[in-house]
Image (tube, helix red, strand yellow):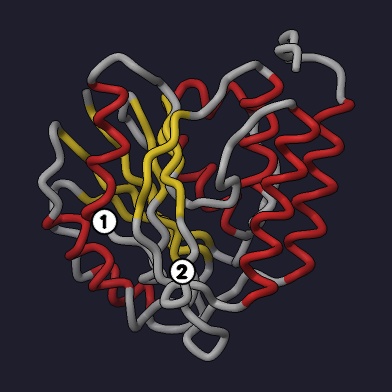
């Protein structure tokens, strides 16, 4: 099984090199490829990434302008060749060493879609409202789709590449997290969750998501819940 790790990058010249070195150092239980998309960075991110272009495990792609995280992941997934895909943000908030945990349920035949679930402790939370926003969006998804997931907005979502392409995720920005989860839940696919570590960075350190992304996520959840097509019968309460 080949795993494609998709890495969207936007203005991360300080962390881009460390991100790729961290991924290359992980002992994955199988073959991996790393597909990096520079999403129109305006700093030196692309120059930093090009220093890895001779590595056979890394593929570099560049958007001529910033299109958003969702668009970068869509580009990476189309270029990937793996059986499964997982996203790894180049922001230093996630630990690459946790990625093999997501593969374990798949290799054991217990799941095909796996989420890495974060526990927000005092040392890892960006702010009270950031955590409450995450929990609120997850709660909304659970109510709308009669599910019980713990972390909708997690970056760590491992799933078959073909399934991702079939879902036809159109959101260009951070809303892709809500759209992807909503479409999975609407199909009756409940992600298998495993615990992961997480340390949020601050605005000063480069955190990009805002409250408006939360509003968009709620709108996308509602839209997908009422949209016709691609729906399986939801389990009864």
Q: Distance between the residues labelled 2 and 1?
A: 19 Å
Residue at 24% across / 18% down in the picture?
108
Question: Residue reaching furthest bottom?
Answer: 204
What residue is drawn where x is 72% and y is 45%? 139
At 28% across and 46% down in the image, what residue appears? 99
- In which quadrant will I find the C terminus? top right
Residue 228 in picture, x, y percent from top left: 86, 18
Circle on res. 123: none
70 with respect to 154 (left or right): right
- The first of marks 2 and 1 along the sequence is 1
| Secondary element at tag 1 | helix
Q: Mark 2 = which residue?
A: 121
Which residue is the site of mark 1? 96
* Mark 1 crowdedness (10 Å alpha carbons): few <14, some 14-19, many ≥20: many
> Measured from the top left, where is residue 73 in percent x and y?
50, 47
- Of 118 and 91, nearer the camera is 118
- 85 to the left or right of 229: left
Image position of 229 with respect to 15: above or below: above
Q: Which of 42 and 162 is in front in this view?
A: 162
């Amino acid at each position: 099984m080949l795993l494609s790790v998709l890495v969207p990058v936007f203005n991360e010249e300080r962390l881009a090199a460390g991100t790729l070195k961290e991924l290359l150092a992980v002992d994955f239980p199988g073959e991996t490829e790393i597909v990096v998309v520079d999403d129109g960075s305006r700093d030196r991110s692309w120059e930093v990434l090009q220093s890895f272009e001779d590595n056979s495990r890394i593929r570099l792609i560049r958007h001529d302008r910033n299109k958003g995280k969702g668009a970068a992941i869509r580009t990476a997934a189309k270029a990937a060749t793996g059986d499964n895909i997982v996203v790894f943000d180049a922001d230093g908030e996630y630990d690459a060493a946790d990625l093999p945990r997501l593969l374990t349920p798949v290799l054991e035949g217990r799941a095909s879609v796996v989420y890495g679930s974060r526990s927000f402790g005092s040392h890892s939370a960006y702010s009270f409202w950031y955590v409450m926003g995450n929990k609120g969006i997850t709660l909304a998804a659970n109510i709308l789709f009669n599910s019980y997931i713990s972390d909708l907005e997690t970056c760590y979502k491992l799933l078959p590449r073909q399934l991702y392409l079939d879902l036809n995720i159109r959101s260009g920005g951070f809303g892709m997290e809500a759209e992807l989860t909503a479409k999975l839940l609407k199909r009756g696919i409940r992600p298998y969750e495993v615990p992961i570590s997480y340390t949020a960075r601050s605005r000063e350190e480069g955190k990009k998501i805002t409250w408006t992304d939360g509003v968009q996520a709620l709108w996308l959840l509602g839209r997908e819940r009422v949209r016709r097509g691609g729906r399986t019968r939801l389990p009864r309460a």
